[in-house]
Image (spheres, rainbow, N blue to C red):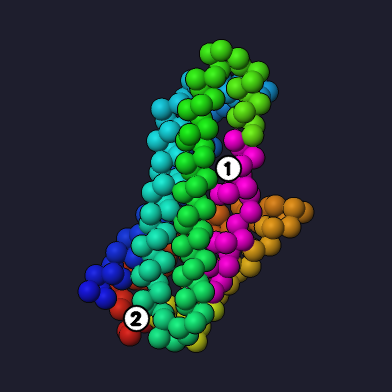
């Protein structure tokens, strides 16, 4: 059962990394909004691409949050013997993070549907509402990555003492975790990119470690 959970956690970690990659490809490659200037035009872009944006939000937020829950539980089981109290804290932050991510995704999906219907009647009001939805979504699962940063930092810190993960992966986790925590400072907004890209590497590496090695052999 333990090995099965570890394999599920490894798959979940790779799925989370994949959702980040899908988000980057879709929003910076496939979905080109450069011709849509201004709030009203941004809603027009939403209307023109509503299907693919809906699917993107399901992948980036809903699928990612479900995978985070599985990964959080698997990591707790993997590392809890080394520092039970700290791993309970880490698991709490991981589950809260997953909840916030899915809340951000649901806010965007429901908000987008409301805005699309309102756009046909009042484009200006729809644009105002979409801006408000964007602010809420950004607060929940956007620019500030403190929850994810604390979770990754605690996981990496416990793994230094308890084993269970490669030390180089732990060093990377500490760097990423600190970067995520520091995104709470407005002047350090650039660290959001560092945290996001660093997570892709961390999740993929973590996933393969959990798929290939049991906690005792690591």
Instruction: From the image, tell me which residue sits under label 1.
Output: 137
37 relative position to 8: left or right: right
Density class for disc 2 (Cα within 10 Å; few <14, some 14-19, many ≥20) is some
The answer to whether residue 218 is above or below residue 39 is: below
Q: Secondary structure at mark 1?
A: helix
Q: What residue sits 58% from the left and 68% below the top?
A: 150
Q: What residue sits 68% from the left and 52% below the top?
A: 190
Mark before the other along the chain sequence, 2 or 1: 1
- Image location of residue 34, percent across then percent down: 61, 26
Chief secondary structure of the magenta span?
helix
Density class for disc 1 (Cα within 10 Å; few <14, some 14-19, many ≥20) is many
- Image location of residue 122, percent across then percent down: 60, 14
Q: Nearer the viewer, mark 2 or mark 1?
A: 1
Residue 63 disc label: none
Which residues make up the magenta segment? Answer: 133-155
| Quadrant for the N terminus in the image | bottom left
| Quadrant for the C terminus in the image | bottom left
The answer to whether residue 97 is above or below residue 76 is: above
Residue 39 in view, yes or no: yes
Q: What residue sits 40% from the left and 72% below the top?
A: 75
Magenta region includes residue 116: no
- Image location of residue 192, percent across then percent down: 63, 53
Residue 163 in view, yes or no: no
Residue 144, quarter of the rendered image: bottom right
Disc 2 versus disc 1: distance between alpha carbons?
Answer: 37 Å
Instruction: From the image, tell me which residue sits under label 2.
Output: 215
152 relative position to 51: left or right: right
């Amino acid at each position: 059962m333990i090995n099965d959970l570890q394999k599920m956690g490894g798959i979940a970690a790779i799925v989370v990394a994949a959702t980040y990659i899908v988000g980057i490809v879709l929003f910076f490659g496939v979905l080109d909004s450069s011709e849509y200037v201004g709030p009203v035009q941004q809603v027009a872009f939403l209307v023109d691409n509503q299907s693919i944006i809906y699917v993107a939000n399901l992948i980036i937020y809903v699928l990612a949050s479900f995978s985070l829950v599985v990964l959080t539980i698997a990591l707790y089981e993997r590392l809890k013997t080394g520092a039970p109290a700290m791993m309970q804290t880490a698991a709490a932050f991981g589950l809260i993070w997953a909840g916030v991510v899915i809340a951000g995704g649901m806010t965007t999906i429901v908000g987008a549907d409301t805005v699309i219907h309102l756009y046909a009647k009042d484009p200006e009001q729809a644009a105002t509402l979409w801006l408000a939805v964007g602010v809420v979504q950004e607060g929940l699962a956007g620019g500030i990555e403190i929850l994810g940063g604390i979770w990754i930092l605690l996981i990496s810190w416990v793994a230094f003492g308890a084993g269970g993960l490669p030390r180089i992966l732990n060093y990377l986790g500490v760097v990423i975790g600190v970067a995520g925590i520091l995104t709470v400072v407005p002047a350090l907004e650039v660290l959001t990119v560092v945290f996001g890209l660093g997570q892709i590497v961390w999740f993929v590496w973590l996933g393969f470690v959990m798929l290939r090695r049991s906690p005792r052999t690591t």
